[in-house]
Amino acid sequence: MGLPQVVIVGRPNVGKSSILNWLAGRRVAVVDPTAGVTRDRVSHLVEVKGRFVELVDTGGIGIDDPDKLTDHIQRQIDIAIDSAAVILFVVDTRAGVTALDREVDQRLRRVKAPVLCVANKTDHEKLEAQVGEFEVFGRQVVAVSAEQHRGKDRLLEAVAALLPPDLDERSPPAAEMKLAIVGRRNVGKSTFVNTLVQQERLIVSEVPGTTRDSIDVRFELDGKPLVAIDTPGFRRAKSIATDIDFYSTVRAERSIRRADVVLLFFDCTQPISKVDKQLCHYIAEQYKPCIFVVNKWDLMAGQIPTSKWVDYLRDTFRSMRYVPVAIISGKTGTNIKSMLRRAQALFKQAQSRVSTSRLNKVLQDAIQRNPPPSTRSLSPRIYYATQVAAAPPTVVVFCNNPAAIPQTYRQFLLNAFRQNLPFAEVPIKLYFRSRSKAQAYEKLEPGPAE
């Protein structure tokens, strides 16, 4: 599983961004008394009692944005809540329980993730008597003050107790791969699913936009149970004219987030569009393994070589050259089985874990070939790396100064990991963290048990 996400939610001006900065130990989010400063999700890697998590800040629930971005803000909050392992419901001790706090509480009643009530702005002991007011929500309450640095250990201990168990601490469950089938309208997604399950499971129509909701279809490949998620066709934002179109897009994006592998469909008779590029960008943002699927090849067979479309995709999506390409016909079934086996291979790659020793051998070889560039004011030193999660593979590199590692060198290391580790065709999350030379030496020094 990937890194657990600890999501901070609450009404405006309760100090959500201040808590993110406080726990991160640096100014990550903008803090301002003006309501609505945070709109998009803001995340940062944080260590909680020996485990790494992604701490995610969100916009204020109930904000009426003056720039008419209220729907966008609420959508980002929904995405964060859907992916949360733990939710921090932040309230203001000085203000007490408000009507909007009650609305937030009711909204969180529908989520499966554990919710911890964080009473922020408990700046001194006299205010702690007011914290009991929030027990009306029936949740565990932790009193803190991000501004006065009070209650941090209590909060981290409470979060650690609610985190799901690490995969390394238990045997992995029987995996059932979920395939999200996405693409713009009328690229043959539903026809492909019908061919896949060998029955008329879905409506197939030449009218663009027939599928308006995401549909899960179970099938088997070589005796293994799989799920295909057929999704509505994506449209450009300015073309979304109705509520049905809007919610179809929301559901399709949610399907991408819960998928193990995404099949991004292209129509071989049509050029790559702006919608295709937007979809590709969204898949990359979610760090999902992906296959570029060139469909309807029965209409083009013999007219152009397959290599022409492969080169076209590589030239268009240069940052995703690692993504494999499948040339298929959803109507006739050509190459479908081999594509599904490739998807299974990506699924296994994304779940792979490598030892710290193997990872650091690759890292040191890369550094010897090409040391990180130095300037007069910055002299970067990289000490070691460790994989902290899978699906997606997540690597933390420890160094003396993350700000001194330029983006070009980060990409160089990413390519080195992809070429020399079992992550050749899947996205990798790469973080850089500060650590002193003495700490790095202590970490690498083998202990008695090793």
Image (cartoon, helix red, strand yellow):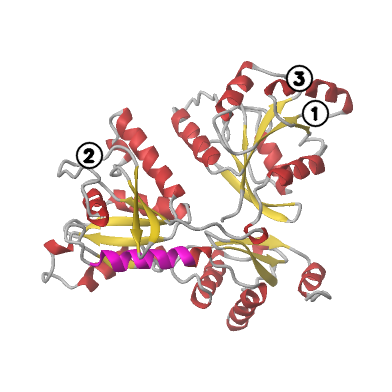
Position of residue 295 relative to residue 419, above or below, is above
Instruction: Return the mark for residue 210.
Output: 2
Q: Residues within 10 Å of mark 2 (few under 14, many from 20)?
A: some
Q: Residue at x 53, y 69 (%)?
A: 414
Q: Residues within 10 Å of mark 1 (few under 14, many from 20)?
A: many
Disc 1 or disc 2, which is closer to the eye?
Answer: 2
Q: Nearer the viewer, residue 254 or 434?
A: 254
Quadrant of the rendered structure where residue 99 is?
Answer: top right
Q: Is residue 389 magenta?
A: no
- Is residue 380 at all visible to an observer of this figure? no
Percent position (x, y) of residue 171? 61, 60
Query: Majority secondary structure of the magenta segment?
Result: helix
The residue where tag 1 is placed is: 122
- Marked residue nearer the N-terminal end (1 or 2): 1
Extent of the magenta region: 335-348
Q: Is residue 345 magenta?
A: yes
Q: Quadrant of the C terminus?
A: bottom right
Q: Residues within 10 Å of mark 3 (few under 14, many from 20)?
A: some
Instruction: Return the mark for residue 133.
Output: 3
